[in-house]
Image (spheres, helix red, strand yellow):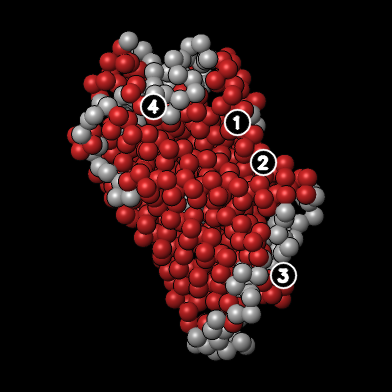
Amino acid sequence: MASSPEMAATEKIRPLSPSITPLSSTAMGSTDVEKSETALKKSISNRQFIFMAMGGSIGAGLLIASSTALQVGGPGALLMGFLIVGIAVTLTMGSLGELAATFPVAGSFYDYSVQFISPSWGFSMGWNYILNFLLIVPFEVTVMTLVTKYWNTDLNSAILIPIFLIALFAIAACGAKWYAEAEHFFGILKVAVLVGFSITAVIIAAGGVSTDDRHGTGFSYWQDGKAFQGGATGFLWVFVAAGLAYGGTEMLGLTVAECKHPQKVMPLAFKIVSLRILFCYLLPLFTVGLVIGADTFQKIPLGRVSPFVLATRAANIPVLPDIINAVILIAVFSMASASIFASSRALRAICDNGMGPRLLAKTTKSGLPLNSLLVVLAVSMIAFINAAPKGETIFDWLLALASASNFFTWLSINVAQIRLRLAIKKQGKDINEVLVWKSPAGIWGSMLAIAIALAGLLSLLITALIPPKGLSSSDTVGIIFVRHVLGFIVVGAMWLVHMAVTWNQTPHPLLIPLKDIKLSKEETVAAAQE
């Protein structure tokens, strides 16, 4: 996977000024015609953005991958792991909100890596993010086939995949406005079902469901060591699932480039995301851990099924499992749609900044990055691997790669925010004059988020070398290790290649000194004209 970005780095790399300006094309010396060909339209309303912040990025990570995390780690590990990573994501959104409100740009966080860390690290983070979401699309399509087979295991993946891809790219081709409108609807549906499930699970646990032979579960799945049954490695494995489940939250920083009032919506998104993590992640995961445990998966073997579906099946509630599975299918479809949006916009932005083929930076008159969308469509064909024997193992490979990518993304956002704050202090400027909005957690919050992201990356390495006992996999330790370190290889290769090619072209290839970081629009424009 590293070959494509490496070729792009070798064939076409223009030295970037370590600064950001909303007119990134101007920074690269583009003409007015070029700017019009690569410009995105601000067509997403505040209403649409708010509902995207509520329900966006809820997909296979929460709804499917949490199943394995529950089996391996236990309900206590599941809740604690998602809580810790959720704290990191909340803090990261504060850091991203601070950056995006002050410097709203189409490239989002990796542009901030270019300005506040180094061009080479920004190049690495940009292509890491693009590869992540390019591959998340076939991952989510894979999950959609698995979810559909809940009703009929004999369904052919080769028939299902084209149907899903056509529907996904039909929405993408309609542009940002209709994508946002679809996510508006999907967001409301996902939030409603997750909150509704939480209420249902409490009733099941309390013995209020007459069809449940258990007549109430109480806290039985939390007793006798079941809460943390997987031990230390089981707890660390939960980080892998959580790293995937929360991935995509930061894509709001990409969406803000097509919002009408970016300075207003990002600070608001920080507050909404905090509530979403509580009511759409932690509450449902806590309640599902009340009504099913590791033994439930053995009693009702359904393969890769959502724990939320299994919970209602275990209680023998008629119809409801089918309804929840249908909503999960819609939710995964929504995440796949969001991944197409994120990867196409990120690819357009990074190429517009000279870190990839200029052809992919062009947009149609309506602002649609058509060429980038076609690249995403081509990569999405990887999903057809599902039709091959044992093709569903792609699920595990893409899960590990996405988890590593997400942890690197959050790490980079917080480092950029810390260096912005330090640069303000170093240059003796007033923080209130530079920043449009400040993260409530400040630098200390970013440091905590960085520590959690590093723990997540470390968990990938530890669980690769010492797989948890409850993990059912036919893969050898060697295969699991390669799968888990692949994300590290991608990031390291991108960083080293760009740094090697541009070593004599950029004044600070390793790290931009704090005194040289540009902190105002006037400075960025001046730097762009040099």
Rendered location of residue 145, percent (x, y): 64, 54
Residue type at numbered disc 3: Pro
* Quadrant for the N terminus in the image: top right
Image quadrant where residue 294 sits: bottom right
Q: Earlier in the sequence, mark 1 or mark 2?
A: 2
Badge 3 vs badge 2, beta-carbon distance below 8 Å: no
Where 57 falls versus 428 (above or below)? below
Badge 2 vs badge 4, beta-carbon distance below 8 Å: no
| Residue positioned 67% across, 75% down in the render | 296
Q: Which residue carries the number 3 mark?
A: 301
Residue type at numbered disc 4: Gln
Badge 1 vs badge 4, beta-carbon distance below 8 Å: no
Give the crowd class for mark 2: few <14, some 14-19, many >=20 residues within 10 Å. some
Give how far apart the Cα atoms at labels 4 and 3 are.
51 Å
* Quadrant for the C terminus in the image: top left
Tag 3, which secondary structure? Answer: loop
| Residue positioned 61% across, 69% down in the render | 228
Q: Earlier in the sequence, mark 1 or mark 4?
A: 4
User: Could you say which is closer to the camera, residue 315 or residue 262?
Assistant: 262
In the rendering, which numbered label is found on residue 3? none
Q: Which residue carries the number 4 mark?
A: 115
Give how far apart the Cα atoms at labels 1 and 4 are.
19 Å
Give how far apart the Cα atoms at labels 1 and 3 are.
40 Å
| Residue positioned 37% across, 54% down in the render | 273
In the rendering, which numbered label is found on residue 492? 1
Q: Which residue carries the number 2 mark?
A: 485
Give how far apart the Cα atoms at labels 2 and 4 are.
28 Å
Q: Describe residue 491's horizontal placement relative to residue 14 as left or right.
A: right
